[in-house]
Image (cartoon, grey):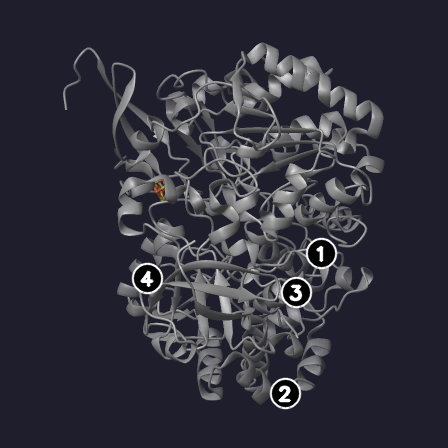
Amino acid sequence: MAESPALHVRRVTCCGCTQQCGLEVEVEDGRVHAVRGAAEHPFSQGYVCPKATDAPEILYHPRRVTTPMKRVGPRGAGHWQAIDWDTALDEIAARIADTTARHGAESLAYAYGTFRGGDWGIGERFLNRHGSPNACGQDKVCYASLTLAETLTYGHGPTVFTWPTPGVTRTVVVWGMRPIASAPLLWRAISRAHRAGARLVVIDPLRTQEARRADQWLAPRPGSDAALAIALLKSLIEQDLHDAEFVARECVGFDDLRAHLAGVDLRALATDCGIALEDIAALARDIAAGPTVLNAGNGLCQSGRPALDTARAIASLIAVSGNLGRAGAHQLAGPPRDLRANGQLLDADHLAPAQRAKRLGAERFPFIGAGYQDVDDAVAAAWHGHRHSQAWIATAHTPSLWRAIELSEPYPVKALVVQHHNPLGANPEAATAARALANPALELLVVQDLFMTPTAALADYLLPASHWLEKPYFSLGIAFVAPVGDFVAANPAAVAPVGEARSDYALWRDLGRRLGQADAWPEREEDFYSQCLAPASLDFATVAAAGMLAGAAARHPDHAADRAPQGHGTPSGRVELASSLLAAWGRSALPEPLAPFSAEDDHNYPLVLTTGGRALEGFHESAQISARFRRRRPHPIARLHPAAAARAGVRDGEWISLHTPHGTVRQVAEFSDAMREDTVVADRWWYPEGDAVAPDPFGVLATNINVCTPGDDRHSDAVLGAWLLRGLPCRVTPAVAP
Ligand code: SF4
């Protein structure tokens, strides 16, 4: 298309989710008119989804926050006054300085979301320099268990995003994942391999779109994946299908693993997960025959107590079946060696060890505490000194944040900055979180976001955030989603920000300059990114002109790709089927078939609850702002089987109450026979158009299923502190609309 003088086409990387597709953005008179896929982009090759094409709706939405606001009156009362940026920043900086002087740097915490336009790492850089260890991410329920399990087992992870190779990969197992909605580029690769003859097996309690296209659908009870993974491992070894040569050459602990599995009752495991013994044995044979790719999803990381053991069993399955490092199967690439250099961006070494030891949850969950250093040392030893590649999963424990605010345990948190994130909707114990954020013991709550959210409604300062099309892009993180290897990408902002919106970088820069970090924050974020590129004699403009550099051109000079790792990044340098670090931390070195809940908890709760499924129209709760999505889904849905509904006396399309041992909310029943009969699937927070007033801003406590999910230690994984979102006992009853 010929461009008119006012019409420009900008090439950008999409930040609508973690896939990083290439886009062409039509800009006319400074406004985005249309977004389409960029055909020549090496990852996405023209792919685009509604999250990207709906970007103009989000950018110019009438409810978008466009000016800084300061609370007047009681917190959450809904009364605000406009404030200019400089005054807001002066006041916020003074209050952070004051709480830090009285309670230590750790009294400042930061909560951030999952890349819905946020710049990963920038806030952590500020905190590391400030001396606070309390950046709270969503990593615990977003691949941390899978990543850590693979790292403990074979020295780096994750490999579970490996794209299958058409014509080479013979089996693809999609497990606890909806790639059509959450990882479309991976799904495209899976579909190509399937068309080329690979057998496709989907493991999910729901007969998803992916399951309908699969050769086989296995439907385990939600939360029973540890039982299924260990059953597959036991079956594979008992059928003598393990790769003996790989095990002898690369692994330690195989005899311990085999002895451990000998004590496990395969029939009991099959009953626990509801999968027939012959299906377990047949899938074990397919995996062993290989090449096999196991694409495991973050559904497995959301089962709380068994999450890490589930992932450890899967990592062991990949290794002993000979599918690690084999063509067409899982590739162990090691830490990204590209120029974004995580440790440098995060300034991770600025945080003193004594402050790091105070990270919320460190005293209870070994990987949040001293265990992080053990893992980092082992990875660095094998991967030529590359540090902090696991930093993104070693963040502070969010449920512990609420206790620190309310009870000052283990010490008080007095100031909290939330960016691109709504903890009241996304985290467990929503009622506890709401109480903590409204508590006067929290002296300062700052939220920077695109829209007013339930969390923002409780803020002292609400600051307008730039959309990802309104700020420069640099490939800051999540390179693990790119199976193309090392790359670095950059682009300028496509358009100027609406109103007074500012980038994440600008907030931390301006706070940093007021709080003694002036040397760390160049004026322009492009210049900051250029500092990251300088070791390779590159700068932001050069990379942006190319759009993307891949392979050798993108590599940090300290991490040349042609240097093979020195063994595996574990303490032994081998694939550790029995983990020496888990044993050193006082945890089981071998995967255990744990369950999310104990049997006595199931009393009175005949159903099993799973939560948090993804829609293609949005990244987590961002779909709810889309008019197109809301026409299709006006209310939060609790999906359940007609037989279960009949037993509970509830009717299709009517409001029901969902009860767990932790709370009750209401949603609209939707019947489906494409799922297990004992399962109910419930939505999270739903109503961004609601009333932003405490005590229940936007109805977040009336209909959000995270009122019913626990964040306590008893239901959390004992190494990472991953909390429980899937596999809870549940019952439903008829209700009226809230
Ligand atoms: S899948 Fe959609 S939202 Fe995600 S990066 Fe690609 S176009 Fe953007």
Above/below status of 576 relative to 422: below
At label 1, which amino acid type do we have? Thr
First in sequence, mark 2 or 1: give its number. Answer: 2
> What is the CA distance from the residue labelled 2 to the residue labelled 1?
30 Å
At label 4, which amino acid type do we have? Ala
At label 2, which amino acid type do we have? Asp
> What is the CA distance from the residue labelled 4 to the residue labelled 2?
35 Å
User: Dot 1 surroundings within 10 Å: few (below 14), some, or many (20 or more)?
Assistant: many
> What is the CA distance from the residue labelled 1 to the residue labelled 4?
32 Å
Residue lying at the far front of the rendered structure: 736
Image spot of residue 324 (x, y percent): 54, 63
Which corner quadrant holds the N terminus?
Answer: top left
Residue 265: image tag: 2
First in sequence, mark 2 or 3: give its number. Answer: 2
Could you tell me which secondary element the residue under label 1 belongs to?
loop
Of the pair 543 and 30, the residue shown nearer to us = 30
Above/below status of 25 relative to 389: above
Q: Which residue is mark 3?
A: 305
> What is the CA distance from the residue labelled 3 to the residue labelled 4?
34 Å
Residue at 60%, 24% in the rendered image: 73
